[in-house]
Image: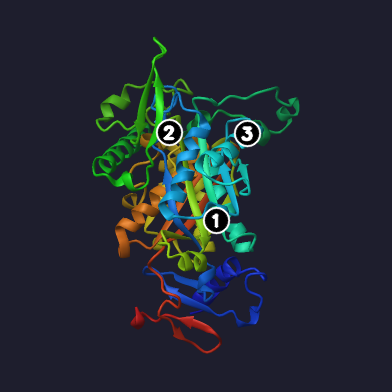
Amino acid sequence: MEKAINRQNILLHHLRPSSSAYSHESSLSASVCAAGDSASYQRTSVFGDDVVIVAAYRTALCKSKRGGFKDTYADDLLAPVLKALIEKTNLNPSEVGDIVVGSVLAPGSQRASECRMAAFYAGFPETVPVRTVNRQCSSGLQAVADVAAAIRAGFYDIGIGAGLESMTINPMAWEGSVNPRVKSMENAQNCLLPMGVTSENVAQRFGVSREKQDQAAIESHRKAAAATASGKFKDEIIPVSTKIIDPKTGQEKPVTISVDDGIRPNTTQADLGKLKPVFKKDGTTTAGNSSQVSDGAGAVLLMKRSVAMRKGLPILGVFRTFSAVGVDPAIMGVGPAAAIPAAVKAAGLELNDIDLFEINEAFASQFVYCREKLGLDPEKINVNGGAIAIGHPLGATGARCVATLLHEMKRRGKDCRFGVISMCIGTGMGAAAVFERGDCVDELCNAKKVEGGVNLLSKDAR
């Protein structure tokens, strides 16, 4: 009981509504409900003030410079998923309080302008503002978290968190000179390490073998191929009408892209074993066990639950908590191992309560390390494949993961209540967020009233 109350207090701190949304704090009551087999899960009775996701979509992810979006402008990647949020929910676009777009590689002012242009292409009026956010590989998830926080704070009731990256147009490269001062501090110097070098550092420091890395890559392709073949991604992918230009003739061919084009279903251990290490002569990180350089976009529509209910919109998921943490830049890939426990604890849960994980496969070395460090069930992680197979357009990955996770949770229904998204972040960070399936909790969780204003759900009531 004491453990349940303590966890209730932790989550109450994170879920307490703002004074503008709920001025009578004294009337706030809480309920503690059992989740899974172990942890106590608490929610405020201000049920309508949950931040919920009513729609989440993405483009297909395509190979940079060689794939289906190699001749597509970045704003033409973002516009279709923004437009889909309006069309598939019948939302009045003028009601959106803000559009926040995660993006990493493009010059900041240019990408901000492109995102504003994309909003106009999608049908948003000039009254709807747009901004960008850059937290490296977690930028798309950070955008969703920023919107959720703004809704919770009462800044607006409806917002969009999105992500965009064209790694064809904006390749990974340092522009301009580096401050010589960086040489005076190891951590600062390690912020400039190539990501592949940090992968080698993780593999070497924690003993992640080449065999384990290649096997993780095979599994990623196998699961992504199976998900594609069974049509699982159709619910989340918005087809994009664009063009492909023949590099030899310059001839333009109109195409509609609706399938991830980097998945290799026939990948074998023997095939991967032939690949040479890319970043270290005697290393283990190869092109085959690293995430794919990709182009793509995603968008997530969030609002207060009370607004979604008033509009009669189906609730795909509930945004629960978000955590960003710092780690050693030299082994930045360990980020999820630190961020996931923080986010799960903030939600008043335990790792065993999480039914699905989407952990970005930046490199197989760090993915395997995080999985083993946390002792996670491999059957719960990236069940439809990950970035090694699907791709990793840096700023878009977080939004892509939200779409993939929530649609899979919806398919699984009552067997899947909580999901986590996490990724490592360049320069040494990790981010994670906890989501709850949208249709599985009633207002009071069938809770029994207990003296003192705390409601506990007994095992008998489950």
Mark toward the viewer: 2 or 3? 2
Measure how far apart labels 2 and 3 are at the Cα level.
Answer: 20 Å
**Within 10 angstroms of label 2, few (less than 14), some, or many (20 or more) residues?**
many
Badge 1 amino acid: Phe
Residue behind mark 1: 322
What secondary structure is marked by label 1?
A: strand
Name the front one of labels 3 and 1.
1
Disc 2 marks a residue whose amino acid type is Ser
Residue at 71%, 27% (x, y): give it: 183
Q: What percent of the width, then of the height, locates residue 151?
A: 59, 60
From this view, report whether residue 449 is shown above or below residue 388.
below
Q: Could one spot residue 14 in this view of the protein?
A: yes
Answer with the quarter of the image where residue 263 lies: top left
Residue 227: image x %, image y %? 28, 43
Residue at the location (39% across, 51% down)? 405
Residue 291 is marked as 2
